[in-house]
Image (spheres, rainbow, N blue to C red):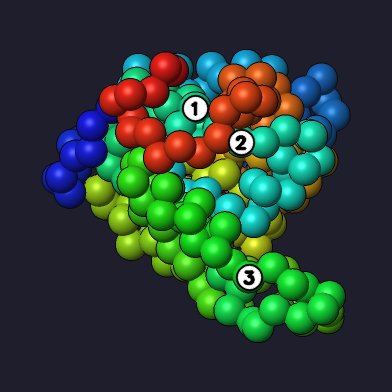
Amino acid sequence: MTNTSFTKAINTYKPLSEEPNLSGKVQIKNGNKTESSRQREPRTDFAATNDSNRGRVAIFIDGINLFNAALQLGIEIDYLKLLCRLTAGSRLLRAFFYTGIDISRPTTNRPRNNDKQQGFLFWMRRNGYRVVTKEIQVTDNTKKPNLNVEIAVDMITLAPYYDTAVLVSGDGDLAYAVNAVTSTGVRVEVVSLRTMTNDCLIDVADYFVDLDSIKHHIQKDSHLGYSYRTMSHSSL
């Protein structure tokens, strides 16, 4: 797995306008009108990312969404395994990890500071990820931090330089950005926990993979911690 420069090969994927059976089309069968649907069913394997024709791959991970999905699954994510699984032998352009950083002062209700998080993000930067952060002031009434704007801007801005985007998020607010990217001929794979994924995001993606179906391939071994190991020393 190697990072590549920003020179895009010829894109072999057709824009949505050229694809047959788009959502909203009405087909007539046996004299009855039936409306076709592009809704994606969850895949039970990772066939989508085993396609040798994926070209250059860019990965966009909503860290907060993934963390909540891991809590639902009762696992800890091994981010080296995750990166290798999502790349699946394809040429990696860049892997982004988006998250919020708590800059509020410790209180009696929240005595911990963000030292542990900073250590984790340092590890991520040393192991193949481009980390994008947003500073937040956490209070008892604070909504969860949202980096959808950053994700959408990066997906659209870099679209001329990759052939396949892997979006690890279930947030329906990203559906418009995904639709804009796929309309240029880029293939988009959405990876998320099905119960936390908005249907409109699945509908505009080319592939959907349920995290539950690959959790055994991306979870951290119970006896291992983040020891700042490099990709070359990974046992994957």
In the image, is 35 to the left or to the right of 92? Answer: right
Q: Which residue is mark 2?
A: 77
Q: Quadrant of the N terminus?
A: top left
- Residue at horizontal 45%, vertical 32%? 80
Q: Which mark is residue 113?
A: 3
What type is the residue that disc 2 sits on? Answer: Ile
Res. 175 image quadrant:
bottom right
Q: Is residue 141 above or below residue 183?
A: below
Total numbered labels: 3
Q: Which mark is residue 184?
A: none
Q: Residues within 10 Å of mark 1 (few under 14, many from 20)?
A: some
Q: Residues within 10 Å of mark 3 (few under 14, many from 20)?
A: some
What type is the residue that disc 1 sits on? Answer: Lys
Measure the alpha-carbon separation of dots 1 and 2. Answer: 8 Å
Q: Are marks 1 and 2 in contact (CB under 8 Å)?
A: yes
Residue 230 placed where, x, y %? Answer: 33, 33
User: Looking at this view, is 214 or 22 the one in front?
Assistant: 214
